[in-house]
Amino acid sequence: MHIKQVVIAGLAMLAVSAAAYAGPSGGTVSGKVTYEGTPAKMKPIDMSKEPSCAKMYATPQLGETVVTGAGNSLENVVVYVSVGAPDDAAPSNAATFTQKGCRYIPHLLALQVNQELKINNEDQTSHNIHPLPKLNREWNKSQPPGTPPISERYDKAEFIPVKCNVHPWMHGTFAVMKNSHFAVTGDGGSFSLANLPPGKYTITAWHESYGEQSQDVTISGSENKTINFVFKAKPY
Amino acid sequence: MLNIKKICLNVAVALIVPAVVPAQQADQSAAKPSKHMESHIGNLTGHSEAGADLYYRYCWGCHGARGNGDGDNAPYISPQPRNFVAGTFKCRSTPTGTLPLDTDLYDTLGRGFNFTNMPSWAALTAQNRADLVAFIKTFSARWVTEKPADPIPIPAEPKLTVESIKHGGELFQKLECWKCHGQEGRGDGPSASTLTDSNDQPIRPYNFTTSNRSKCGRTNADLYRIFMTGLDGTPMPSFADVVKPEDAWDLVHYLRTLQVNNPSPELTMWETTAEGKAIVTAKRVRNTYTGSGVTP
């Protein structure tokens, strides 16, 4: 009887450690997001109606609908596993979205379903945070300077445009993801999705202006696969 | 034998097709809810089945056969008719992002929306309005999956004082209400011309000098509720997390003094002071108000 229990306990421990190691030993999908063609020129933002923000910049800031880098790289693209991975529970840390200098930092915030979303206002002016979801609840909150962070959660996966009605140039995106396998491209346009257990996946890249693209990829063992996405730039 | 079968089939198809052709009718039957909804207004219980008949008589011309705000009149209306499928409502006693109470929808029907194409339906019986509220709730699955939140608490209104009005005026500056509503409350603040609602349609901030009725009511408690809950689907945000209840009443008292063409106890008291008298007099004429030392 005792031996049986010990054996079971031992097996259970092995199973637990095997599960724990399944992650790091998984494969990786990485690559680069680029564009072809000529992207529209982003217009300089006129912040003269908000002097407290305008004075923070020596030169006018450009809009962030399309942000490009060297080698035709495309920023603010969220690359994620759209098919093949199970839904994940939300992580305990909060995803932070900051209003600073009448801009959204980051412009695109990717977070998980039911993950805490913390919104800060570091400006000397009032903002209202007005996300415009179609599937989730639509709310609209004012955040004057010096007030505590707003804490919210979204319970459905969705790309949600976010805007400030007071400052019409401020707009961004909350990308609410079903699982933890996602990345947002920064300077250089590269992304990496690590710890993917062996299997067949659909990898999707989404951009707020250029739309989305998908590619299928099969991971066996701990291999590293490279896939690239090329978006067609919109001239206007 | 086969031919007869074929003919029968053709006849059957021919019978079915004309039934589908009148698109509006088809829309209507498709939109009729399979589920039953009720509303509870005091002692009244509204039933969606009865509400459906009323809806397809009075409401669908603007709000559409499927309740998504795309009725025949919708393209000519601004602000656009409410999309009931989205389940987002302006006038609520509940926090931003939550469903309204049955009584909120019922009151909206009776009141109509000032400055819009939505008239008051007070001419219908109370039972009719309760039935309509029940039917409106069949359009969005949110009424099945969610419950309306608890209404925001509204403490008893404190005694009106000049200090209360003055403090409210400071809050109007601090919270930057003037960014949209303007220093004179005329709805002409620096951001006013850029405002759009959740359908990307232009929308105007409330002009306090036109009347003492706003979209969601005319009492002091209505004003309190409007800025604390926000008007969902519009640029007007909720201030519930940033304004303390006692401050909120001060702001209500000040907002009343912006309604310079409508007598109110607040306006009367404000005009008993020399400062208030000068400000109100200036505000009655556009662009003569210079503010009390606070300029944008």
Image (spheres, grey):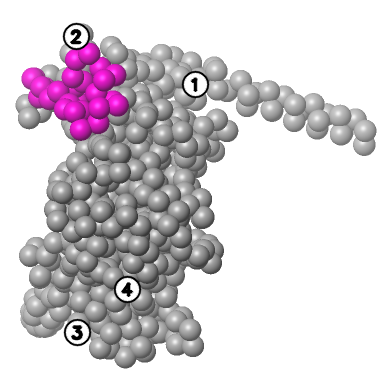
Chain ID for label 3?
B
Q: Is residue A70 left or right of residue B273?
A: left
Q: Residues within 10 Å of mark 1 (few under 14, many from 20)?
A: some
Chain ID for label 2?
A
Q: Is residue A57 left or right of residue B252?
A: left
Q: Secondary structure at mark 3?
A: helix
Contact? badges 4 and 1 (CB < 8 Å): no
Report the mark closest to the observer, 4 or 2: 4
Image mark for residue A195: 1
Q: Which residue is mark 3?
A: B57
Report the mark closest to the observer, 1 or 3: 3
Q: A19 or A50, which is in the foreground?
A: A50
In the rendered image, which quarter contains the C terminus of chain B? top left
Q: CA distance from mark 4 to mark 1?
A: 53 Å
Q: Which residue is mark 2?
A: A71
Q: Residue at x 8, y 76 (%)?
A: B21
In the rendered image, which quarter contains the N terminus of chain B? bottom left
Chain ID for label 1?
A
Q: CA distance from mark 1 to mark 3?
A: 59 Å
Q: Position of residue A122 (x, y in %)?
A: 41, 27
In the image, residue B288 sits, relative to residue A100, either above or below, namely: below
| In the rendered image, residues at marks 1 and 2 fall on the same chain | yes
Say which amino acid is labelled 1: Asn
Q: Residue at x 46, y 45 (%)?
A: B242
Say which amino acid is labelled 2: Gly
Q: Secondary structure at mark 1?
A: strand
Image mark for residue B108: 4
Q: A37 or A98, which is in the foreground?
A: A98
